[in-house]
Image (cartoon, grey):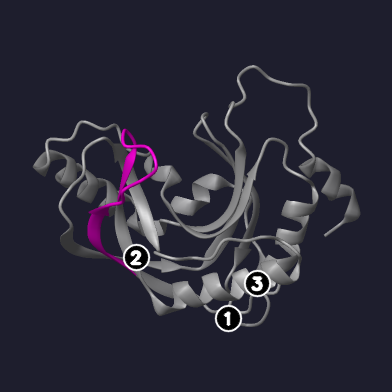
Amino acid sequence: MPEFIQPAFDFIEPPDPRRPKRPERVFTCIGAGTAAADAVRCRERIKRDNAILAKGIAPERFHISLCGLGDYVRIPSRVPFAAMRAARCIALSPFEVVLYRAVTFPGFNPDRRPTVLLAQSGELRELGAVLFGHLRREGLKAGELITPHMTLFYSPRSIRPVDIEPIRFRVDRFYLIHSERGLTRYNVLGCWLLNGLGLATAGPLAFGSMAA
């Protein structure tokens, strides 16, 4: 990466009253890809069957987290810079993910329990594990992929776990995201394509491509 890019990650602009009061988050993830529309239809059925009126997450923001890189009041430039170095070391091929079951996680806030679709894929877990190892070698305190899932909505109400018609989609890239928590806004800091030919290559820096 050219050295002149690194200062752009310092987030040193003057305070903006619109910026979230909550710490901002950095994480890696995959997008929903072609599954976004099917996930929306599944979400609406779940809400209807359980009489839940929650708004739901915008489909263009559907994702499955891989590794968390922490919450920060001000993100140090070393965090995204080291994460990008780690991401470029990934040498995996595209793979398939299956969403197969809807559940509600307990959550720390009883008013915002997340209802999610559980994800199944050995390659997804491998990507998370390999990326975690490279992030730790770069000196980052990364959090591991524990229960792969795609969050649909938050609500005080829980649902009974239920199997769904499997939703399958192909994953050929992963992302580094800066989440402005409280503003529901994601900034894509990096995107890497899984080409199966060697190290991951840079992809488009557009969040919309997560649902492409």
Where disc 1 sits, the SS reads loop
Q: Which numbered circle lies on residue 165?
A: none
Q: Name the residue under label 3.
A: 200
| Front position among marks 3 and 2 | 2
Task: Mark 3 or mark 2: name the one nearer the start of the chain.
Answer: 2
For label 1, the crowd category at 10 Å Cα-Cα, with few meaning under 14, some 14 to 19 and many 20 or more, is some
Which stretch is magenta?
98-115
Where disc 2 sits, the SS reads strand
Give the quadrant of the N terminus.
bottom right
Q: What residue type is labelled 1?
A: Gly
Quadrant in the rendering for residue 166? bottom left
The percent position of residue 106, horizontal first and vertical second, equals: 31, 48
The percent position of residue 34, horizontal first and vertical second, equals: 37, 58
Q: In this view, does 65 lie above or below 24?
A: below
Q: Which of 138 and 97 is in front in this view?
A: 138
Q: Which amino acid does label 3 sit on?
A: Ala
Alpha carbons under labels 3 and 1: distance apart: 8 Å
Report if the CB atoms under discs 3 and 2 are less than 8 Å apart.
Answer: no
Q: In this view, does 163 lie above or below 96?
A: above
For label 3, the crowd category at 10 Å Cα-Cα, with few meaning under 14, some 14 to 19 and many 20 or more, is many
Q: Mark 1 points at which residue?
A: 196
In this picture, residue 24 sits left or right of residue 13: left
Report if the CB atoms under discs 3 and 1 are less than 8 Å apart.
Answer: no
Where disc 3 sits, the SS reads loop
In this picture, residue 196 sits left or right of residue 60: right
The answer to whether residue 58 is magenta is no
Q: Mark 2 points at which residue?
A: 119
- Seen as rendered, the residue at the extreme bottom is 197
